[in-house]
Image (spheres, helix red, strand yellow):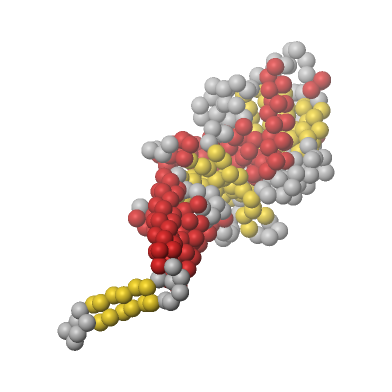
Amino acid sequence: MTKYFLRSLIDWLFRRRSIGLRLTRIGAGLFVVALVGLSVGITVPTKDGPFIFSWDSSGGAAVLTWAVFLIATALVVIGLVLIARDVRLENRKKVIVIEARGLREWAGEPLENAISPAVKGRRDAFTVDVRQGIVDGQIVSPARALERLSGLPDDISRRASGVDRSDVTFALGGLAPVPLLFLLGVIVDDEHKTILMDWDRKSQMWRTLDDEDDGKRFAIAGLSGIHKTDSRAVLAVSASYDVFDDDIRLVEPSAPIIRLDLADRSTASHWSEEKQQALAQQFLDTTMDLGRRGISEISLFLAAPASLSIRLGTIYDKRNLPKLLVNQYENGHPLKFPWAVNMPVAGRFRPELIQR
C-alpha cells in the first residue's frame, strides 16, 4: 500500500492537473520572490567557532517581503494537503482490468498498460485465457473455454470485495470468439462504470474509442415478418462483416429473421464511443421490441468488433429481455455456426454450450 501511495504521489507531481498542485507551484514561485527581498541570518555553533550563514537582499519593504513569505508557505502547505487527499482518494478507487485472450498465440501489449493514467484507481488486472485447444484461430474445445469464463463472476466479486461500488471501474477488451466476448459483457453488465478498448490490428496496439461519430446507424428490417404464433426469432447483426441469411438457415431453418445492418460497415467503423452507444441503444430497443411481440427466445448472429460485442453484452437486461443464444461463426465448417452459447439471462444462471 505504501509503495502504491508513493507511486501515486509521483504520478500527481508529474502528470496530474489539480488545485493542490497548482497551489504548490504558485507557493514555490512566491518563495523565490520572497527570498529576493528577505534578510536571513543563521548561526551554527561548531568546534572551530560559529558558522554564520546570512542572506541580506537590499531593497523592498521588510513587512511586504515577510507577508509574501507567509502566503507562499500557506499555499505550499495547503497544496500538499490537497495533493495528499487526492492521492488517498485515488488509492481508494480500483480499476479492474479484464483482458480476454481467445484467438491466436500472440505477445502483444497487455491491456493494463494501455489504460490512460487519467483513469484513477489501483490497477487490478487479470487475463481470461481461453486459448487452449486452438487451431489457426478456431477454438477446438469451446467447452473448456466456456468453463474458464464461468468462474469469472466469483473472481470479480472477490476483487471488488471491500470497495464501494462507486469506486470500481472496469476496463474491458480482448480478442476472442464473439459468444465469449458477449458473455464477458453479460457477466460484467452495465451496473459499473466501464471503459471499453479494442485492439487496432493496423497499428498493433490497444486503442480507446476516441474517433468522431460519423452518424452511421443500423438499418432495421424484418420486424413485420413476426407472427403472433412466433416465440423464437433470429436477430442478425452485421456491424463489421456480413451475416448472410443462407448461412443462418443452415442452423435456424424456420425462425423469422430480423436484421440490423450498419451502413458502410467495415472492420474499422467502430472507433467512436458515441457511435457505439447509439448502436447499442438500437440493439437494446430491438430486443425489447421482440419481447413485446411475444418472442421469448432470440438466436443472435453477430458480426462485430470485440469492443462492440462486449458492449452489447453489458446492456442486455438479464431479467426482462428474452432468452438469448449467441452463435459462433466458423467459415470452414459446413454448418458455418457449429456452436453457440446460451447466455445466463432470463432465469438461466449459468451459460450453456450448444454444439451442433
Whether 160 is drawn above or below 91: the answer is above
Residue, x 45% and y 44% (percent of image)? 93
Q: Quadrant of residue 243?
A: top right
Where does residue 204 sit, x and y in percent of width and height? 65, 59
Whether 231 is drawn above or below 341: the answer is above
Residue, x 40% and y 56% (percent of image)? 74
Where does residue 208 sit, x and y in percent of width and height? 64, 50
Q: Is residue 226 visible?
A: yes
Taking depth in this image into account, of 4 and 243 the one nearest to the observer is: 4
Residue, x 82% and y 20% (percent of image)? 224
Q: How many marks?
A: 0
Taking depth in this image into account, of 200 and 39 the one nearest to the observer is: 39
Image quarter of the C terminus: top right
Q: Is residue 333 visible?
A: no
Q: Residue furthest bottom?
A: 48
Residue, x 64% and y 53% (percent of image)? 207
Where does residue 62 sit, x and y in percent of width and height? 40, 67
Whether 320 is drawn above or below 59: the answer is above
Taking depth in this image into account, of 239 and 27 the one nearest to the observer is: 27
Q: Is residue 267 left or right of residue 18?
A: right
Q: Residue furthest top?
A: 228
Q: Is residue 154 left or right of residue 212?
A: left
Where does residue 31 sit, x and y in percent of width and height? 44, 66
